[in-house]
Image (cartoon, grey):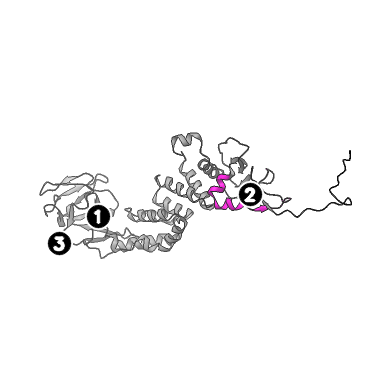
Amino acid sequence: MNTSDNSTSGGASTPGAQRRPQPVQWDLVFFKVRCSTLQQVDERDIDQDLTVSQVEEITFPVSPHRLIENSEVFAGMFHLPTSENQRVEGRDKEHPIMLEGYQACDFNALLRILYPTPLDLISGAFKLEQEEWVGVLNLSTRWQMKEIREYAIKNLSKLSLSSVEKVALARAHKVSKWLKEGLTEILAESPIPPLDELEKLGLKTACRLLWIWNQRVSTNASPQGLQVTLRSIGCYNLNCQAALFVNSMNCRACGRQIAVDDPEAMYFFGNCSVTIHDRGTPGPGRGTLIFNSQYLRCRHCANYPINPQNYPCTSCGQHTSYSTFRLISPASRPNPSTNPSVDEVFKEEIISYESWDQ
């Protein structure tokens, strides 16, 4: 039997056509993220069909299709064609895809969102700490994971973020909603936060906030446009920020109950004027609003509702005369519609962040 190969002529082989670069079939991919700070991360089960990611020398199993589905960055990277003999980073542990400057805890938190456990699905919630949600927001923003980013913002918004935290997070991760909320809340605080707190937001921001505040509390203040509640009436002691009234009371004339936070229960009467007491200290708290309670009127009976007497402060113990009440709360400021707003002063920055949510 002739077993020779007659498929070639003259013993010479015919070279085949050059193979075009083809997309890599990513059955297993390795990532290594370098960061100078090592953090402990819980281990996860390994599956042969998963992509393996290594962060700060810790190996993570990650299914490639979830990264491709949720991230424009990874979708583009994994679909790049390569030649047959080209070494592809990420195909083995010795040649991982290097990601610089990321944290293991952030990556681990993102994996928990991308690959929920049965317990996560049964409970219907991911039990992540605030810093873990911030990590998810950080990576989803960098890697263009729109739905994951929105989910992280939604869950962080449920937490008790301070006004300064909102502004800092807004600027780090381009969240317009938090920027507006944080700056508005800072302006609503009474007194305004200390200068060292404002400086954390940057000198330019601190200056803008102080300018808005001073525009709202000008030395030409009048009772027109001012609102007053029982809780907004404070101790005359300029070093004390306590309210004189913390509970509801009845109008001295008609007996109608005045809720402690009801801005419609009382109003300033006629040509009442408000005295600006200069505390002598620079900043938005320099001008303190002082008024005589006999210029207040009950909206129900049009008589003055508070007894003309001295009132003890439960905080500092000092007595305050009815003729030297001090306005201390946001309700005592002029109507913000007639003053510069956060949306106007920080308009360009807010618009630039809104583009990230389109």
**Residue ID at (38%, 63%):** 345
Q: Earlier in the sequence, mark 1 or mark 3?
A: 3
Q: In the image, residue 114 lies at what x, y percent?
A: 52, 43
- Residue 100 placement, left or right of 298: right
Q: Give the CA separation, mark 2 to mark 3.
A: 72 Å
350 drawn magenta = no
**Residue ID at (44%, 35%):** 123
- Residue tagged 1: 327
74 drawn magenta = yes
Q: In the image, residue 33 lies at what x, y percent?
A: 61, 47
Q: Range of the magenta residues? A: 65-92
Q: What residue type is disc 2 on? A: Met
Q: What residue type is disc 1 on? A: Leu
Q: Earlier in the sequence, mark 1 or mark 2?
A: 2
Q: In the image, residue 103 lies at what x, y percent?
A: 56, 46
Using a 10 Å C-alpha cutoff, classify the residue at mark 2 as few (fewer than 14 neighbours), some (14 to 19) or many (20 or more): some
Q: How many numbered discs, if any?
A: 3
- Residue tagged 2: 98
Residue 158, quarter of the rendered image: top left
Using a 10 Å C-alpha cutoff, classify the residue at mark 1 as few (fewer than 14 neighbours), some (14 to 19) or many (20 or more): many
Q: Give the CA separation, mark 1 to mark 3.
A: 18 Å
- Residue 252 placement, left or right of 70: left
Q: Of circles 1 and 2, which is in front?
A: 2
330 vs 42: above or below:
below
Q: Of circles 2 and 3, which is in front?
A: 2
Q: Are marks 2 and 3 in contact (CB under 8 Å)?
A: no
Q: What residue type is disc 3 on? A: Gly
Q: Nearer the viewer, residue 26 or 223?
A: 26
Determine whether the residue tagged by mark 2 lies in a helix, strand or loop.
strand
**Residue ID at (39%, 53%):** 182
Q: Are marks 1 and 3 in contact (CB under 8 Å)?
A: no
